[in-house]
Amino acid sequence: MKKIYGSAAEALDGLLFDGMFIAAGGFGLCGIPELLLDAIKDAGTKDLTFASNNAGVDEFGIGILLQTKQVKKMISSYVGENAEFMRQYLSGELELEFNPQGTLAERMRAGGAGIPGFYTKTGVGTVIAEGKEHKDFNGQTYIMEEGIFADLAIVKA
């Protein structure tokens, strides 16, 4: 298996397709895979779903893919500081699934380990719990969260 590539575009060659689900690493604007995001933008891949801590800002991170309307859905814990994200979401052009930060991380971990779902107390009694299975354990209510199974995970390394 080749592990070193001359460019981000070369590393992604043959992996990208329209409608794919991408898990993206980083926290805020720190540690995001900006070179891979640039390569995805240049490839023109569209109708993407991203699971990421955030949606970047207007000129950086996933924000560059929002500007070119390549993203159809975000699964995030924070989406502030991005005017284009706000515009697309409020106009109905972009889907959003909010997740508490720890739940998002655990959903990614679970998917990576082949675990289809797990129960958590986080979000019980809030809009996060709406439409999700509830179950009591030892007198405490938990909600079911599904693991995230992405087509591709990108990280800055």
Image (cartoon, rainbow, N blue to C red):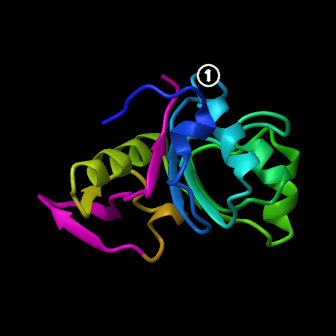
Percent x, y for residue 22?
A: 52, 53
The residue located at (62%, 39%) in the rendering is 9
At x 25%, y 58%, the residue is 119
Span of residues in magenta: 132-157
Residue on which disc 1 sits: 30
Secondary structure under tag 1 reads loop
**Front in this rendered view, residue 54 or 65:** 65
Front in this rendered view, residue 16 or 146? 16
Quarter of the figure with residue 80: top right
Vertical comparison of 114 with 109: above or below: below
User: In the orientation shown, which residue stands out farthest toward the left?
Assistant: 138
Residue 133 located within the stretch drawn in magenta: yes
Of 52 and 137, the residue lying toward us? 52
- Sort mark 1 into few (<14), some (14-19) or many (20+) by Cα contacts within 10 Å: few
- Residue beneath the point at 51% across and 60% down: 21
Q: Label 1 is placed on what type of residue?
A: Cys
Residue at 16% across / 61% down in the picture? 139
- Residue 48's spot in the image, x, y percent? 63, 61
Q: Is residue 109 above or below residue 144?
A: above
Q: How many marks?
A: 1
Q: Classify residue 131 as left or right of residue 92.
A: left
| Left or right: where 132 falls relative to 15 | left
Q: In the figure, 125 relative to 1: above or below?
A: below
- The spot of residue 1 in percent (x, y) is 30, 36
Q: Where residue 10 appears, x then y in whole percent? A: 57, 38
